Each structure stands twice: as structure tokens, then as C-alpha cells.
Amino acid sequence: MSAMRYLLVAVIAFAAAMAGVWAARAWRASPAHGEGQIHQLLHRDMTLDSRQQQRIAALEARFAQRRAGLEAQMRAINGQLAQAIEAEHGYGPRVAAAVDRSHLVMGQLQKETLQHVFAMRGVLRPDQAARFDATVARTLTDPPSPAP
């Protein structure tokens, strides 16, 4: 194999690795944007009674545990992706399989996040739910703030 071909394979592998890193960072950054606004609404801007606070705290604790598990799975898959890129030096079957696994876990996290949001909404009074709905809609449509 010529030196030029080795260079091309190295550049492709590097680009694939950077794409994986970018995707992982985007995946991790986007929930924080929405969660921050929803968390602020629930805990600072909205007057919740003590029963509502207790129920939401329990929901948040359960979800935090589940999210941590899914994030651990994503880290493991990212390690598998890195190994596959190292082994294949291109978009081969191992790389494709790792990408597919990461998409499944990201999709599961998105589904469970939405279930969590709806569970918290179920704790609210109708007037609170209307404000909550508006905040959720805004977090889904507003671009995240640029990182400092």
C-alpha cells in the first residue's frame, strides 16, 4: 500500500472519529438546554405545593438513575466505535454496527426523557401545565445558547 493510501485511510479514520465525538457532544448538550429551562420553571418560577414537590423530586430521582445508565451505555458504545475505527480505518461493518447501537441508545434516552416530561406534567394543576407546555415547546424549537 502506498504512503498516499495510508494517509488517505488515516484522514478518513480521523474524520470518522471526529464525527463520533461531535455527535456525542451534540447529544449530551441538547438535553441540558431543555432540562435547564424546565428545571428552572418547576423549581424557581412555579409555585408548587409540598405534595407536588415531593412527587416531582421522586420522578427526577428515578429519571436521573435511568439517564445515568443510558449515558454509561453511550460511553461504552463510543469506546466500541473508537476500537472499530482503529481496526477498520473506514466505515466498515463494525463502525456501522457501533453507530447503529449508539442511535438505539440515543433514541431510548429521548423516549424516556419525553416519558419523564409527561410524568412531571401529570403532577401539575391545569394552569401550571399550560405554562409547562409552553416552556417545553420553546425548548424544542429554540436553538441552544452558544457555549462560552
Image (cartoon, helix red, strand yellow):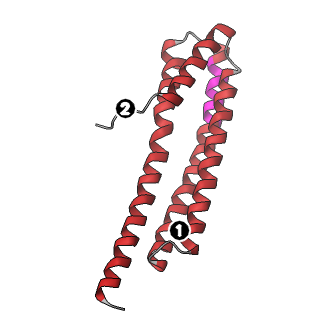
Nearest to N terminus: mark 2 or mark 1: 1
Position of residue 49 relative to residue 123, above or below, is above
Q: Nearer the viewer, mark 2 or mark 1?
A: 2
Position of residue 39 relative to residue 97, above or below, is above
Q: Along the line of sight, which residue is nearer the eye, 41 or 91?
A: 91
Tell me which secondary structure the magenta stretch mostly adopts.
helix
Which residue is disc 1 drawn over? 80
Q: Position of residue 111 (x, y in %)?
A: 66, 41
Mark 1 residue crowding within 10 angstroms, few (<14) / some (14–19) / many (20+): some
Magenta highlight range: 53-62
Mark 2 residue crowding within 10 angstroms, few (<14) / some (14–19) / many (20+): few
Q: Quadrant of residue 72?
A: bottom right
Image side of residue 101 versus residue 75, left or right: right
What residue is shown at x 34% (from left), y 83% (from top)? 6
Mark 1: which amino acid?
Gln
Query: Dividing the image into 4 quarters, which one contains the C terminus?
Result: top left
Q: Position of residue 75 (x, y in %)?
A: 51, 58
In space, the residues marked 2 and 1 are separated at their CA atoms by 31 Å
Asked if the magenta segment contains residue 54, the reply would be yes
Asked if the magenta segment contains residue 111, the reply would be no
Which residue is disc 2 drawn over? 145
